[in-house]
Amino acid sequence: MVLAVEAKRLSVGYEELEELLWAVRGVSFEVREGEAFCIVGESGSGKSTVASAIAGILPPHAVTEGELRVGGRLVVKGNERDYEGVRGHLVTYVPQSPGASLNPYLEIGDQFYYVLNNLYGLSRKEAREKARTYLEMAGLDPGAVLDRYPHELSGGMLQRAAIALALSTGAKILVADEPTSSLDAHLRLQIVQLLKRLRSEVGLTLIFITHDMLLAGVLSERIAVMYAGHLVEVGPTKEVLRKPLHPYTSMLIECVPVLGVKRPLKAYAGEPPNLSEAGRGCPFYDRCPFRLEACASEIPPVKEVGESYYVACWLY
Amino acid sequence: MNASRARFNSAVGFLDLARRAWKRSARLRVGAFLVGVVVFMAVLGPHVAPHPSDGWGVVPRNAAERAGKPPCPEFPFGTDNLGRDVLSRVLVGARLALVQITLVVSVSLALGLLVGVCAAYYKGPVEALLNYVAEVFLALPALVVALALRLALGQGLHIVVASLILSWWPWYARSSYIYARAVVEMEYVLLARLAGVPARTVLFRHVLANVAPPVLVQAITDLGSVLLEASAINFLGIGLPPDAPDWGVIVQNGFRYIVSMPWVSMFPGAFILITALGFSLVGDSLREELDPKMRRRWKLWF
Amino acid sequence: MAEGLRALRRRYVEVLRDVSLSVSRGERVAVIGESGSGKTTLLKVVLGLLRPMKGEVVVLGHRIYEIPERERWKVTRRIGYVPQDPFRALNPRLKVADIIAEPLSRLNLSESEKEERVRAAVKMVQLHESVLDYYPSRLSGGMMQRALIARAVVHEPELLLLDEPTSALDVSTQAQVISLLNAIQEKLNCAMVTVTHDLAAAQYLADRAVILHKGVVVEEGSFSEIVRNPKSDHARVLLASYTLGVSEGPLAPLGAT
C-alpha cells in the first residue's frame, strides 16, 4: 500500500519578531493513495500550515522538524525541505478564495499555458488542448472560459477553473484549503459533487482543510482533528463523528448549528489559544470538562484505539 | 487569525511606534543620535561657542590677521575670509537651522492635515474645492515663490519660512486626503455618526487620530529635506542676509574662496548633510515600523 | 412597532424590489441572503443611510427619511448596530472602555453612571473588566466581536441590528456569541434583526426568517415552516446546500434523528 502522505513528528514554526512560534507541533499521520482525508480545526490549530507543508508552499522563513513524505518522496527532514519534482508534479493546491490561484492579469487559457509549459514544456496548442480537457472535467464550458479574465467569471466558475488548473498538472494529490467556505450556499453542493466525481474519475487523493464538520462528514473517509498545533484525534470519519473520543472533537460537534434540528447549542467557555501561549501538558486543558491531573503537566501521547484510529488524550 | 491581528499593529499611536522601532532598529538609534547632536548644538551652541560674536556674524577687530586660517587648535574649523571662527558660526547656525525646519514642517503639517481630512470627510463640493486648491499650490516650486516674496517683502527669515510652507503644505494635504479617504469609510466612523457624536469630535477622535501617525512619520523625514531646500534658498541669497548665522549662508560666504579656504563651506555643508541624514534615518525606520508588509522576514547581514 | 418598509428601489441598479418587512418590539427576525441579495442595502436603508426610491421606511415610530440627515441621529441612537467586520468597527486609537462608552455621550449621564453602564455591558457579553483598558490590537476575534456587541447594547437600544454576527468566528466561539445575544435580547426585550447568510446559525437567533434572493423576498415564515415546506426554488437550493446529502448521523439536518 503506497502512502500518499506520511508525516512523522512533523513540526513547523515561524520566526515572528525574533520569536519562534510553533504552528504545528509534532504531528504524525498517514494518508493512503486515493483516500479523501480531511483536517479540521479552528483558528490557530495549525491546519493551514500542515496543508502548506504537504503542498510545498511553506514560506522560506519557516522552520521545520521531523519528517514528511509526499508521494513516497522525502520532502521535509529536520529543517531541510526539498520539493523538487514534488510540488506541482505530485501534489497541487487550491487555495481558499476562489480564483486566488489565478493571475488577475492573464486570461484563463494563458494561465494553463504558463503552468504547463513550465512543468512539462508544452506548446501553446498542446496546453490549450489540455486546458479544454480539464475545464470540461470540472464542469465548465471551455469556450466560455478560456479567453476570459478571472474578474469576468463568477465565484463558482472561478473555483472550478482553479481546480481544473490544479489538476492539469497531472498531480494525483490535491490539497484544498476550505474549498467551500467562501462560496455561496448553492455553489457548495456543486463543488462537493464535483470533488466527489473527480476523485472517482481521476483516482485523486484529496486532502482538504475545513472548519465545517458537515462537509468533513460528507466528503472525507478519514478525519484528523487539530487543536493548537497538536493532532488530537485521527480516524475513520464516520466513527469519529458518531462517537468522538477526544473531548475537543465532541465539543466541535456539539457546537455546530444544524439546520432543522433545534437541539440546544452547547457553549463552551474559552477560545483556542494563540501560538505564543504554549504551556506544558495538554493544550485543551483549560477548556476540557474531563480534566485529569496528568493533563496539566504532560502532553498525552498518541494511542492507537482502533484500526487507523489514534487519539492523544489521557482518558485513554 | 494571527495574521489578522497584525493588521491592527500599524495603526496604533505614534509614541508606541517610536518605542517599538527604537528597540528593533539600529538605524533609528543612529539617526536619533545624529539628530540629538544637532539639537544639542542648537540649544547650547551660542553658549559654548569659543567666539560667540563671530558666531553671530560680527566681524572681529583683528580680522586681518585672523582671516583665512585653516583648521588649527585655536580655530578647530578654521576662519573665514573676514576672520570669523567657523566653529562658532556653525554652532550658532544649528539653532537657526532647527527653527526654520520646525516652523515650516509644523505649520505645513497642521494645514495639510486639516485640509486633507476635511476634504475626505465632507466630500462633495468641499472635497473638490480643497483638492483643487491643494493642486494649485502643489505646482509652485519653493524657489520661485521665494524669489517672488523676496521682491515683494525684502530679505529675512520670513521669506524662507513662508515660501517653504506655501510649497510644502499641499503634499501633506494630499497624503492626509488619501489616508483619510480610507478611514472615513470605516465602520467606527459610521457608528460614531449613528450615535450622534458631533462632526468635529468625529473628525478629531476618529479620523485625525488614525490619519496623523503615517503623515507624521513622513513629516519627520521631511525635516531633512526641508533643511536642504531652506539652505539652498539661503545659499542663493534669497532668504537670509549674508551675515546671518545660517548654514546655507555660511556655505555661500565660503563659496568664492572654495579653492583657497575650502573649510569655510565644507563644515556647514557637512552639518547640513548630517542633519538631513539623521532625520532621514529616523523617518525611514519609523516608516518601516509602520508598514509591516515592508518588514523583512529573513535575516540579512544588515 | 420597531420597523417597517414597503416597496423600495435604488437608483439605476435595482437592488431591492418590493421588499416589505416589519418587526415588532421583542421579536427576533433573520434576513437570510447571499452576497448580492440586497441584504446589506436593506441594512443601510434601515439605518437611514440610503434613501429608497419608492416606499415607506418607518423606524422606531419615525418616518426616518422625512427627518433631515443632520437630525437622524436622534432616531439612530436608539438602535444598536453590530457591523460585520470587527477590524473596521473598532477605532485602534481608542481604549475599549471609550469605544463602548461612546453611545452614551449624548445622554446626560454623570461619569460614574457611564462607568457603571459600561461595566454592566462588559459583563453582559462575558468579557473580563480588565479588557476595558486594552486597545483593540490586544483583542482576539471573539473578544472584538463581544466588545462590539457591548457597545451596541450599552445604551439599551430598542432595536438590535446584527450584520453577520457569527460568520468570522470559530465554531466554538459562535455558540458562545449566539447564546449571549439571545440572553441580551431577552433582557432588553428589544427587536433583534440578524442579517446573515448562515441559515443554520440564524435559526438560533430568530423565530422568523425572511429569505432574500437578488433583491426580492422569496420566502418567509418560521424556520420549521421553511424547512419542511419550502415554496421557492431558491429556498430549496439553499436547504440542499445545508444538507449536502446527509440524512443520518449526529450532524444530520432537517429533523432527521
Image: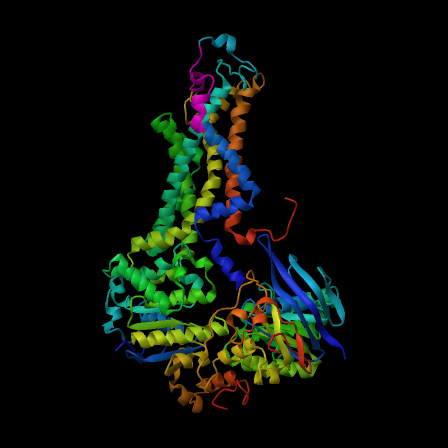
User: Quick one: B67 or A61, which is closer to the camera?
Assistant: A61
From the image, which quarter does the N terminus of chain A lie in?
bottom right
Picture coordinates of residue A91, whole percent (x, y): 70, 71
User: Quick one: B266 or B233, which is closer to the camera?
Assistant: B266
Left/right of residue C166 with respect to residue B129 in the rendered view: right
Picture coordinates of residue B234, whole percent (x, y): 45, 27
Q: Is residue A170 visible?
A: no
Residue B213 forms part of the magenta stretch: no
User: Quick one: B238 or C3, which is closer to the camera?
Assistant: C3
Left/right of residue C21 with respect to residue A255 in the rendered view: left
- Image point 36% across, 46% down: which residue? B133
Using the rendered view, name the quadrant where residue A128 is placed: bottom right
- Image point 46% across, 30% down: which residue? B40
Picture coordinates of residue B292, whole percent (x, y): 53, 53
Q: Is residue B275 above or below residue C148?
A: above
| Number of dots carrying numbers | 0
Using the rendered view, name the quadrant where residue A300 is placed: bottom right
Q: How is the image coloured?
A: rainbow
* Highlighted range, magenta: B42-60
